[in-house]
Image (tube, coloured by chain):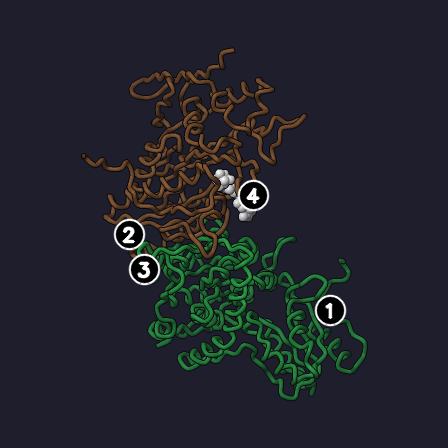
Chain colours: A brown, B green
Amino acid sequence: MAVRKPPVTTREYWAPGHAACAGCGCATALRLATKAFSEAMEEKYGDPDAFAIAQATGCMEVVSAVFPYTAWKAPWVHVAFENAAAVASGVEAAWKKLGRKGKILAIGGDGGTADIGMQALSGMLERWHNVVYLMYDNEAYMNTGIQRSSSTPYGAWTTTSPPGKYSIGEDKPKKWVALIAAAHQIPYVATASIGNPFDFVRKMKKAAKVDGPAFVQVHCTCPTGWKSPLEKGVEIARLAIETGVWPLFEIENGDFHNIKIQSPGGGAKVKREGGRVVAIEFKKPIEEYLKLQGRFKHLFKQPEAIDQLREQIKAMWKVLGVEVTLPKPEE
Amino acid sequence: MPIRTVMKANEAAAWAAKLAKPKVIAAFPITPSTLVPEKISEFVANGELDAEFIKVESEHSAISACVGASAAGVRTFTATASQGLALMHEILFIAAGMRLPIVIAVGNRALSAPINIWNDWQDTISERDTGWLQFYAENNQEALDLILIAYKVAEDERVLLPAMVGFDAFILTHTVEPVEIPDQELVDEFLGEYEPKHAYLDPKRPITQGTLAFPAHYMEARYKVWEANENARKVIDEVFAEFEKKFGRKYQKIEEYRTDDAEIIFVTMGSLAGTVKEYVDHLREKGIKVGAAKMTVYRPFPIEEVRELAKKAKVLALLEKNVTFSVGGALFQDFSRTLVNEKEKPVIVDFILGLGGRDVTFKDLDEALAIAQKALNGEEFDEVNWIGLRKEIL
Ligand SMILES: Cc1ncc(C[n+]2csc(CCOP(=O)(O)OP(=O)(O)O)c2C)c(N)n1
Ligand code: SF4
């Protein structure tokens, strides 16, 4: 019987035995990311291990590096919540001086990236360090017990955006960090999702292979913070893509006129002009995504809030140069 | 041959960095230390220093990048002052806890508010509990020498702690003085290559650094920092001795001046020590029995040396450019702790002066002397005294 090559290396850098919650989508993202990185290093430098990781404080840090244990099989350093990008800058500079070939992977959650770590990230990208920054976006501060971040979507419940008599939950639209990263005109920016793991691996490999800084924002589920079923992480993430909530795209060298928008699947109709996606008619309503998560439960009592979210999503796509139609669920 | 020249303390610090050959430097400008990274950029631009200079977007990132580089196993350097050091505060603890021998040059400057760019020691004093070693320079030569010494102590396997070297804003940072630049070869012999056995980010030997510690381990990690600080006392003495042998300049944790038959000893740090020595000479001419002592090393606190010093005087008059609210100055706290259980001890009087760049004149020192003499004569005195306050604008 022919042995099929596995779709991604069987080498592990994020070992089993970490303490993430069952069903954690971010743990999946880190495992895939390091595998992809390893493949890229093998292809680029002939050495699958030629990388080191600098990571911000957050869930993925505390679950992987509790002294005297570690889940890491790669050189790994954690310093603080807001400075993964700056630490990675230092590691990269040291490697340069040591003549060590390879690439640095910086990892931060949405809080450590979009909020408190934004300055360090901007500095690192602007200085053109040879670092891939991976933002795992679980859309809240999970490590401290599910507080909102600027990457929390409109309407979502968190412990600091509780719905109430005068509150719909989070009342601001989601901040688009990938676009901010792209504004630095760096070689490579992409959004990805654990709902499309092959695409994520491809993008991580691409990011790892470019010379200079790259930024990847991966949407990953958090059953604890999203109040969603443990086994449905990938399905929920995929629904985010198929309903238009989470766009998948790539931007190279900050060229906003040439954003590569990907087809979302799920029966959506994609209209192209000269190879470029200009319109998407989604078939699945965003409610299909929202209804699987307790954090949006209260919205179903106020359908106008869901409409509001629909408008925000349209506006976000418009920035990407795409007209979208977002259906309402059939009554 | 060493080069004898004149330069500012900022240049001396940059020269020290050049001689120490750090592989990564990350710095952000702040008055009065701005010239340090400027000068280092020149060295790097001219190929005189083979280092990566990361022009970071903030001091927070400067120290973070140093932590990253040091964790990757190379010698690092940065310079800052005041608000910049305060912005690093969080990461200073981390650098010490991770046992990374980073060296910072600090142009000692007051902290806001009100914003003030001039000299006092509040910036470094406020970082005294971070686990960093602290040295204070009296002049530009000391600024250079102490940075080299700081590396040697910091990188010693018995220590492995970061170190900061303070030199007074403007009084030293911007003042030209004679400085001897030591031979590169001698410095190379003195410092050697930094080869860490505990911190490296090497794919061939992957380790995890900067972990989370539960209550079962946190305290032990903190104790190891304590222990390293304790070890540093002996290491500093050894390094001072080696430095003297190699470069001919003698350093002591506490340098005494005319203390032998002194009744009152003024204790201070930094450039103020120079003024106080002059002042002591001036008083000695009048037959007043005073002496001076300069703290070159502030962390680890030189407990034994302070006890020895205390045996020599009836009154210790502490002159400090920093405030620890409700206590007085930080030195007062440290000296009190050091002497509290001694059978025989001098009276300690604390003087807070020269904050935010206010000149410390002989007139101010006369004011301090008068209070110290009250203490000497058994009269009533205030334990904490603000000297040179402009009472008319209070
Ligand atoms: C300066 C600072 N402020 C606050 C914290 C507390 N803190 C640690 S992790 C965290 C949230 C992390 O959120 P995110 O980056 O989204 O990662 P996640 O926990 O979701 O994986 C916070 C607020 C901290 N460690 N440091
Ligand atoms: S709280 Fe969420 S992100 Fe954190 S480990 Fe659990 S599932 Fe993962």
The answer to whether tags 4 and 2 share a subunit is yes
Q: Is mark 3 within 8 Å of ligand 1?
A: no
The x and y percentages for residue A162 are 62, 31
Q: Which dot, 3 or 1, sits closer to the camera?
A: 1
Residue reaching furthest to the top:
A331
| Residue A118 showing in the rendered view | no
The x and y percentages for residue B171 are 56, 66
Per the model, the C-alpha gap separating discs 3 and 1 is 51 Å
Label 4: chain letter: A
Q: Is mark 4 within 8 Å of ligand 1?
A: yes
Q: Which dot, 4 or 2, sits closer to the camera?
A: 4
For the N terminus of chain A, the quadrant is top left
Label 2: chain letter: A
Q: Which residue is mark 2?
A: A101
Label 1: chain letter: B
Q: Which dot, 3 or 2, sits closer to the camera?
A: 2
The answer to whether tags 3 and 4 share a subunit is no
User: Residue B47 shows which numbered tag?
Assistant: 3
User: Residue B385 shows which numbered tag?
Assistant: 1
Using the image, determine if residue B176 lies above or below residue A270: below
